[in-house]
Image (cartoon, grey):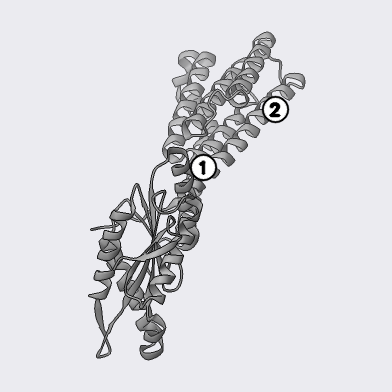
Amino acid sequence: MQHSIKYPITSTYEKEELQGFSRSMAELQWLLLILVILYFFIPIQPVDNTDGLILTMVCYSCFVLLFRYLNFHARESRLKLAMETWAMISFITIALWYTGKVDSPLLNLYLLVIIASAITLGKIMTLLEVALIACCYLYMGYSSYSDALFAPQTFTTLMAKFSPFLLVAYVTSMLAADILQAKKRITLLSQTDDLTGLLNMRAFNLVLEKEIARVMRHAQPFTVIMLDVDGLKTVNDQYGHTAGSRLIKVIAQSIKDCVRSADVLARYGGDEFVILMSHTSTGHARTVAERIRTAIHNTSFDMNGARISSTASIGIASFPECVEDAVDVLDKADIALYQSKQGGRNRVTYYDNALETTAVYA
């Protein structure tokens, strides 16, 4: 059975990333408004429609307040960021219309939107927004020059003024994409075990915290299986650490073949593995644990002419069937694992809270 590894930090990172983008977007919106207000009071050239510009600034201020600070769209998302950039494009376009259209000194305000879009929304959305800006720009140009807009000299001049926007969009999108890929790679490395490719302890603890919060809300069962490789130190001492590392990899694959794709498997320590099984009772977990124990017992490989094999001691704890508090499930599974090792290894033990003890299953 194939096992698909889950990466819990990814969703957490994306959530934090969106929150950071949202804060930056808010600052850009107010910066944009401040720049237009400053131009209104200190214009380089006369404003064509003072009342219209004032009304535009008031409407945009109301939009920012309602949309962002009154929880109109409380959950952060890419769509929310996109909507805010569309509002910025609309505001800039109207401001340009009242301050000289294509000849307005405020034309470069479009760069704020392009950079913000490239960083937060990706290359495709940025190109679409640049196309929207280009349409607005050409419409203003047509309003100013009428059919003369399409005269070679006029059109070339306007496109020369617009070309920096295309360049900034392209370069910023490329850099943002490279940074995003690097961040994803760092995130992946931070939550996986180098040797086995499984989740590491830090990543598993994040998954477990979310599972505990879920079962406490919905009163659903879950089980933790802890597994310790018997005799890894002996293998390292007799055959070298290369053999020990290979043994860990072989056992990791054996475990993956025995669990469901929905189960979360992690390497919890040097010779320890842990499995989180949602919506699973003790009975089903026992069956899986015994299957894992048997698979490991029957697994071996050749190393420099020597046949290397091992066994596994396993502990099980289930909530709420055998453990009353979900927070204690991992600790109780560890207690059951300890009893398996003390009882002779190569066996499965489950924790029973009612008896305040452990019971050997196999």
Q: Name the N-terminal-most of marks 1 and 2.
A: 1
Quadrant where the C terminus sits is bottom left
Residue 147, how many percent across, how many down? Answer: 45, 14
Query: What kind of element bears circle 1?
Result: helix
The answer to whether residue 171 is above or below residue 25 is: below
Residue that appears at 44% across and 43% down: 215
Q: 195 or 209: nearer the eye?
A: 209
Residue that appears at 53% across and 29% down: 85
Q: 226 or 352: nearer the eye?
A: 352
Q: What label does residue 35 carry, if any?
A: 2
In this image, 254 relative to 231: left or right?
Answer: left
Query: What kind of element bears circle 2?
Result: helix
The answer to whether residue 227 is above or below residue 135 is: below
Quadrant where the N terminus sits is bottom left
What is the C-alpha distance between the residues marked 1 and 2? Answer: 30 Å
What amino acid does circle 2 point to? Answer: Leu
Residue 64, how many percent across, how many down? Answer: 61, 23
Q: What label does residue 15 carry, if any?
A: 1
The answer to whether residue 350 is above or below residue 309 is: above
Q: Quadrant of residue 46?
A: top right
How dense is the environment of label 1, judged by Cα within 10 Å: few (below 14), some, or many (20 and up)?
some
Q: Farthest right residue? A: 42
Q: What label does residue 121 carry, if any?
A: none
Residue 199, how many percent across, how many down? Answer: 42, 60
In this image, 220 relative to 259: left or right?
Answer: right
What amino acid does circle 1 point to? Answer: Lys
How dense is the environment of label 2, judged by Cα within 10 Å: few (below 14), some, or many (20 and up)?
few
Q: 180 or 143: nearer the eye?
A: 180
Viewer can see residue 95: yes
Residue 302, how many percent across, how many down? Answer: 25, 84
The answer to whether residue 333 is above or below residue 341 is: above
Q: 261 or 149: nearer the eye?
A: 261
